[in-house]
Amino acid sequence: AQSVTQPDIHITVSEGASLELRCNYSYGATPYLFWYVQSPGQGLQLLLKYFSGDTLVQGIKGFEAEFKRSQSSFNLRKPSVHWSDAAEYFCAVGARTGANNLFFGTGTRLTVIP
Amino acid sequence: NAGVTQTPKFRVLKTGQSMTLLCAQDMNHEYMYWYRQDPGMGLRLIHYSVGEGTTAKGEVPDGYNVSRLKKQNFLLGLESAAPSQTSVYFCASSSGGAGGMYNEQFFGPGTRLTVL
């Protein structure tokens, strides 16, 4: 079965600094990969997803993620963080075959300081 | 366009009581989902539906039942609530088609349930 690891529980960055959130997955083949963001008191919103093709994926709000098969990773990046990016970020994976299910990581909480 | 709405927003139950959470979507989506979110854990899928009149079990279905009598509504029932069911519950929906469950899911704002 697939699983997702987000090693960082909490990250603090200064506004304007760059950001990288880590995501590692365990799966026998290349899964479907997703990043969702959850603002306080709200539901999740899709930032971007990888199904196939170009391993660098562009998303909304200036985010991008890179799929690295050799490292089983799908890290999320943003070159310059805004205060409004403070939220919880979830990586998720889905199997290409077998049972349909999205498996979410435990999340990384991002704090942005002025 | 309201998107995905959930009723109620908060609820406190005593052990053994029953309740139903209501999810409604106005995007004409085929797929609907119920997740639970617990501290230090990611979202876990309870049940889902790929169309009106159909339901299927997710990762953690025990203790819950669901119904999808109308395409726009997905109900989650707790017949006999237990403290272990204290959680935040999220409903989501997505379009059908080729991507299925892996199409973009649109989430409601959540229901915070406490079972004493």
Image (cartoon, helix red, strand yellow):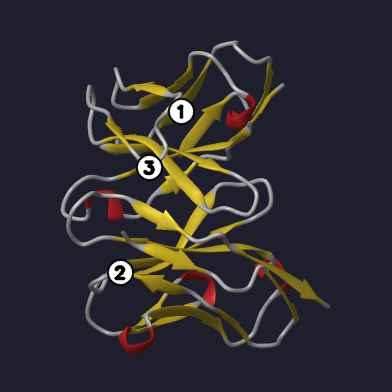
Name the side, left or right, on which B21 lies relative to A48. Answer: right
**Badge 2 sits on which subunit?**
A
| Circle 2 residue | A27
- Rounded to the nearest angstrom, the CA distance separating label 1 from label 3 is 19 Å
Name the side, left or right, on which A101 lies relative to A112. Answer: left
Q: Secondary structure at mark 2?
A: loop
| Circle 1 residue | B23
Q: Secondary structure at mark 1?
A: strand
A46 or B54, which is in the foreground?
Answer: B54
Q: Are the residues under badges 1 and 3 in a single subunit? A: yes
| Circle 3 residue | B59
State the residue at coordinates (58%, 29%).
B85
**Badge 1 sits on which subunit?**
B
Q: Are the residues under badges 1 and 2 in a single subunit? A: no
A94 or A41, which is in the foreground?
Answer: A94
State the residue at coordinates (25%, 49%).
A100
Q: Residue B17 placed where, x, y %?
A: 60, 10
Q: Is residue B9 above or below residue A21?
A: above
Which of pointers 1 and 2 indicates the residue nearer the eye? 2
Q: Residue B103 placed where, x, y %?
A: 29, 54
**Badge 3 sits on which subunit?**
B
Tally of marks: 3
Q: Amino acid at mark 2?
A: Tyr
State the residue at coordinates (53%, 71%).
A61
Q: Residue A93 placed where, x, y %?
A: 36, 63
Q: Amino acid at mark 1?
A: Cys
Q: Amino acid at mark 3?
A: Glu
Q: Residue extending furthest top?
A: B17
Q: Residue A92 placed where, x, y %?
A: 42, 62
